[in-house]
Image: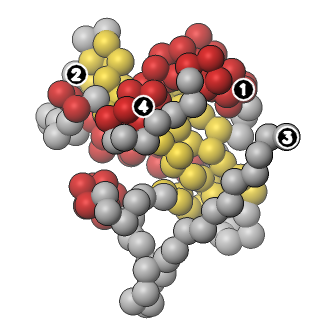
Amino acid sequence: MPGSEIEIVFATAQDAETLTRLQIDFGDEFDEPEAPFEVLLPRFRRFLADPAGFALLARRHDRIVGYAVVALRPAIYNDGGHVATLDELYVRPQHRSQGIGGALLAQAVDESRRRDAGEMHINVDSSDIDARRFYERHGFRNSIPGVDEPVLWYFAEWDAD
């Protein structure tokens, strides 16, 4: 399998800086600026300390080449009792199309299921055709079975004041 030398590991508190750098690189690549390092780092530390989520790192030859971040929450939608949200999945450009994203996604799904999540949600920009194809290739869809209309995601942000 392509990418067979890839190791997927759980991120620990010691990996917060690595995750922060990856998140900033992700935002830079897609022209979606992230908060500065000194703001994101404590957020990742807080996230990694919370049992309601987890992060995965993809390692190749002792280099981190990608990551995934998953948050879980209680839900009434399924018998599993939880819904997992894949907040982030990123593979560095030079390591794409080698099975790394698929390996990260598969491990994220497996771990979410192990933690009693009955489904996973992923938010993707409608214009991001590559990401949409990737998730669809891995069994995700943007409509409810039997319904032709796409599912829409809405959000609101509040100031931290």
**What separation in Å lies between label 3 and label 1 (alpha carbons)?**
19 Å
Please give the residue where the numbered disc 1 appears in the rendered image.
46
Callout 4 secondary element: strand
| Figure quadrant of residue 48 | top right
The amino acid beneath tag 2 is Glu
Please give the residue where the numbered disc 3 appears in the rendered image.
161
Callout 2 secondary element: loop
Residue 12 x %, y %? 59, 18
Residue 104 x %, y %? 38, 38
Q: Earlier in the sequence, mark 4 or mark 2?
A: 2
Mark linked to residue 67: 4
Left or right of 72 on screen, residue 140: left
Q: Which of marks 3 and 4 is nearer the N terminus?
A: 4
Callout 3 secondary element: loop
Asked whether disc 4 touches disc 2, contact meaning CB atoms under 8 Å apart, the reply is no
Asked whether disc 3 touches disc 2, contact meaning CB atoms under 8 Å apart, the reply is no
| Figure quadrant of residue 65 | top left
**In this view, the mark in front (4 or 2):** 4
Callout 1 secondary element: helix
